[in-house]
Amino acid sequence: KAGVTQTPRYLIKTRGQQVTLSCSPISGHRSVSWYQQTPGQGLQFLFEYFSETQRNKGNFPGRFSGRQFSNSRSEMNVSTLELGDSALYLCASSSTGTATGELFFGEGSRLTVL
Amino acid sequence: AQKVTQAQTEISVVEKEDVTLDCVYETRDTTYYLFWYKQPPSGELVFLIRRNSFDEQNEISGRYSWNFQKSTSSFNFTITASQVVDSAVYFCALSVYNFNKFYFGSGTKLNVKP
């Protein structure tokens, strides 16, 4: 069974640019959630999508957005990048959802903002 | 408000020693789930265990064991006879059923030296 795939694995952007990260969940999983990991703030929940609908959102500005497609693949977009957006972005998939389900994580996309 | 506290930032042990990672949580909800995840250097988090708030039974899985005590709001994790491969960052997490959000602790970095 293929795991969660995140692309790209590494990317470098400059302030003001935007970035799109992709996540392909485990086949059959309808829930995809996103997390930001930084040394200062730790692991923080960004949002969860379930069957193409955003179910919940963490405390992040509107520059952070996402969507989920009918095949459950998800994308996360960050617009007008700031230095503080440099982080490891992790995506997780679940068959039942974030609150109750076992989460399967990808290896993350490491974003560096210069 | 929900919160997870892992007071131990970093622990170093010598191989074959037992080690306990502490986790204290806060929530006013009666239905919640507790988790432990392992993050090896590769980055992806690996699910270790899930416990719901109605099940206080301790669990043992090989060298791993978990002690859930609602009276002290703790969910501690013990590794018996530690091995070098156990070196990783370990995260305790809480999800509250009604909110579809995940709350991670700050993580404990475990160094197991040969």
Image (spheres, coloured by chain):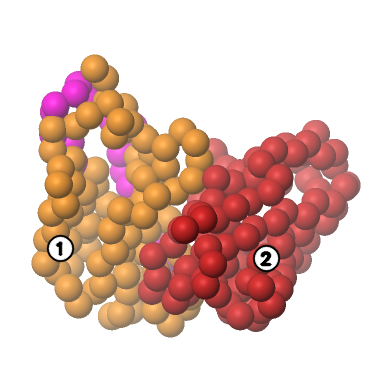
Q: Is residue A72 above or below residue A43?
A: below
**Number of residues whose C-alpha sits closer than 10 Å to that of mark 2, classed few (under 14), some (14–19) or many (20 or more):** many
Residues shaded magenta: B1-20
**Subunit ID for the residue under disc 1:** B
Q: From the image, state whether disc 2 or disc 1 is nearer to you.
A: 2
The residue at 31%/43% (across/down) is B7
Amino acid identity at mark 1: Gln
Amino acid identity at mark 2: Ser
* Labelled disc at residue B69: 1
Question: In the image, residue A113 lies at what x, y percent?
Answer: 77, 38
**Number of residues whose C-alpha sits closer than 10 Å to that of mark 1, classed few (under 14), some (14–19) or many (20 or more):** some
Chain A shade in the render: red
Chain B shade in the render: orange
The residue at 76%/59% (across/down) is A77
Secondary structure under tag 1 reads strand
Find out whether residue A54 is within the magenta segment.
Answer: no
Identity of the residue furthest to the right in this view: A16
- Residue B79 visible in the current orientation: yes
Q: CA distance from mark 2 to mark 1?
A: 37 Å
Q: Are marks 2 and 1 on the same chain?
A: no
Q: Is residue B94 above or below residue B114?
A: below
Most foreground residue, A100 or A6: A6
The residue at 44%/62% (across/down) is A103
- Residue B4 visible in the current orientation: no
Question: In the image, residue A111 lies at what x, y percent?
Answer: 70, 41
Q: Determine which residue is flagged by label 2.
A: A74
Question: In the image, residue A12 lies at what x, y percent?
Answer: 78, 36
